[in-house]
Every structure is written in C-alpha cells, then in structure tokens.
Image: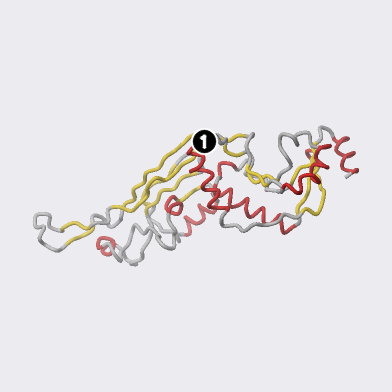
Amino acid sequence: MKTSNYMLIGDFNFGDNNLKEQNILALYENKVHDLWKDVYNFDQNPGYTFDPSTNLCAHITSQSQTNRRLDRYLIHTLDKLSYSIEHLSMIGIEKIPIDPLNIDNNQRINQSDHYALQLIINFRTRSISHRSGLVILPTLNTWSIIHSYSKEFYPSDDLWPSHINLLWPFFDLIDCQADQEDILLRLRLLLSQYSSFSIKINKIDSFIENNIIYMKMNDESTKYVKQLHEQLIKLFPQCLKNKRSSYNPHMTIGQFDNEQKFNEAKSSL
C-alpha cells in the first residue's frame, strides 16, 4: 500500500495459531497492532468470535469444534496519528427464537455462527518533533563530572544536557488532556513494570563517521536500556526514526565540525 495509515477489518477465516498469519505478523514486526490484544488480557479474554462450545450455529458448521478468534480489527502503524480505543466488545451473542411467531417456544439459536465485534476508536493528529525526545537524564549528583567533559566539547550542552536517547524524535507535547491519556499514562503504565536500575559508564568512545565522542555504558547497562527501548518502540512505533539502523544507546559529550578537532579532543580524553 502507498499509505502507512490503514486498518484491516473483517472475518480472516483463520485463528491466532495459523502459520500464515504468524509469518505475516513476524514480517511486519511491531507495525501492526491487534486491537483486541490492546484492550484485553488475551489469557483472560481470548475473544473467540467462532465458538462452537457456546454457539449452536458454529457447533453445526464446525468440523473440528475448535474455538477460534476469526474476526479482527488490525491497525497499521499510524503516521503522525494517534488513536485511543473508547470501546471494543463482542456483540451478537444473544440467542433468538427459532420460531419468531411462537415466542413461548424455548427453542433458541444464535444469529450467526460468528459473534460480531463493535469498535469505537478515536483518532487524533499527533505531530512528532525533533525538538522533543524521550531520554534518560543522569542523576543530579553526576552532572558536575559529566559537565566537566561536555562544557568544552559539546556546544549544545546548555540546550540539551547530556543524556541517553530512548526515542528521538518524540511527540510534540502541548500539555493537553490528550497528552495525558495517549502518551504519559501509557508511559507510566509501562515504566511501572520496571524496577529502578543503575547505569554504569566504563569507557569514553567515539563515532568516527560523524565526529562524536560519547560516554559508553557497560554491557549489562546497555542490554537493559536496549530492552526498555524495544518496549517503547512497541508502545510508540511512530517514533522509530530509522527502521534500518540498530539502536546504540550512548551519552554524547562532544561533537565536532571537522575531523581535526575531533582527533585533538579524542586524544586529550
């Protein structure tokens, strides 16, 4: 498709364990969201829209008598749009009289062999700005030693204190209710699952290709921050700046406009 904004809706005629579906979802990684899984705990409410155990029509038409979630709402990663699900539920689960002219007859049947899904979803335009980032800031007691390096070599230090990028660019927050609901609340819920942790710096390193000097974390800290980054990308896939490059967490302390200055500073550090 020529657009990144689209939804896939309907009867897919295969369940969650179908190999073709798993291959497709693996191909698109975190770009496609299953809205039922956004709302419900799948183990507690699997959302079987084809359920021979409770639906007489499904029981009649099914050969395997296997419960399956055949009907879906899938949404592709939205470009500069955010969404919030107001309501998602299964409907059409009520049984109706087999003989509508004889309502006293206790014989009843489901309206279809599938239950239906009802969705109310809200979309909002959401700009992503290079002036905004989701970052890890060093604790205050470490600023002086970091600043002793960055004040000389990092001209942007006054505007952007030394930090570790988690997501950049990030949403342009405007301190509105939508920010609270769509971004900050979701962030809090994710981060509440993490215990506090320490980041250990054990080396000064450099990116030769763009003349940057940075403080490098040890392997354990790098692994932990990368895991957090992966969860954040799942939460806010719109903020994935470069889908082809790998994430390399670091804290810049020097940036130079030519190779000579870069080499001089690197040797002194």
* Residue 57: x %, y % from top left: 25, 60
Number of marks in picture? 1
Give the quadrant of the C terminus.
top right
Q: Could you tell me the amino acid type at mark 1?
A: Arg
> Viewed as shown, does residue 220 lie left or right of 35?
right
Picture quadrant of residue 64: bottom left
Mark 1: give few (<14), some (14-19) or many (20+) Cα within 10 Å. some
Q: Is residue 203 visible?
A: yes
Identify the residue at horizontal 30%, vertical 55% (top origin): 115
Up-down relation of residue 78 to residue 63 (above or below): above
Render colour scheme: secondary structure
* Residue at the extreme front of the image, as rendered: 141
SS state under label 1: loop
Q: Can residue 2 be seen in this view?
A: no
* Residue 67: x %, y % from top left: 36, 63
Nearer-the-camera pick, 27 or 38: 38
Identify the residue at horizontal 18%, vertical 61% (top origin): 108
Identify the residue at horizontal 55%, vertical 53% (top origin): 190
Nearer-the-camera pick, 228 or 199: 199
Up-down relation of residue 257 to residue 12 (above or below): above
The residue indicated by pointer 1 is: 126
> Viewed as shown, does residue 226 lie left or right of 210?
left
Nearer-the-camera pick, 16 or 174: 174
* Residue 262: x %, y % from top left: 85, 38
* Residue 238: x %, y % from top left: 56, 41
Identify the residue at horizontal 64%, vertical 34% (top origin): 131
Up-down relation of residue 156 to residue 36 (above or below): above
